[in-house]
Image (cartoon, grey):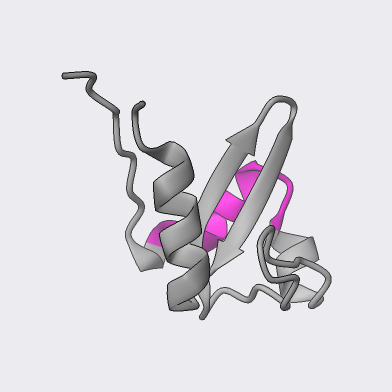
Amino acid sequence: MKRLSLKAVHERDLQALLESLGLLEIVASGHATCLHCGDVVTVDNLHCIVPRGEDILLACSKPACIEVVHLERRPQ
């Protein structure tokens, strides 16, 4: 069975993480969007940060978006 590493961040550290990734201003200004549904992603509805090549994408906490992200990350 293939193992995946899961990285988590406590909500009190989320803003510092977003800042270190250069995403805090984008999220805080309302310009970040979910990679699946296109809705605005905020600190309150951010489900996960998804690296894709050189890009760092965000997914919101809608159940459908969570499901898609997790299905994409499943080992084949």
Residue found at the far front of this picture: 76
Q: Quadrant of residue 39?
A: bottom right
Q: Quadrant of residue 6?
A: top left
Q: Give the x, y percent position of residue 62.
A: 49, 78
Image position of 72 (left or right of 51): left
Q: Is residue 62 above or below residue 51?
A: below
Q: Give the x, y percent position of residue 24.
A: 69, 60
Q: In this view, does 70 lie above or below 4?
A: below
Name the residue: 76% across, 66% down: 32
Magenta segment's dominant SS is: helix
Name the residue: 56% across, 44% down: 50
Name the residue: 38% across, 67% down: 11
Name the residue: 58% across, 61% down: 59
Q: Give the range drawn in magenta.
A: 13-23
Q: Give the x, y percent position of residue 45.
A: 52, 78
Q: Give the x, y percent position of residue 42.
A: 63, 76
Image position of 33 (left or right of 36): right
Image position of 46 (left or right of 76): right
Mark count: 0
Q: From the viewer's side, name the closer residue of 48 and 11.
A: 48
Q: From the viewer's side, name the closer residue of 63 and 55.
A: 63
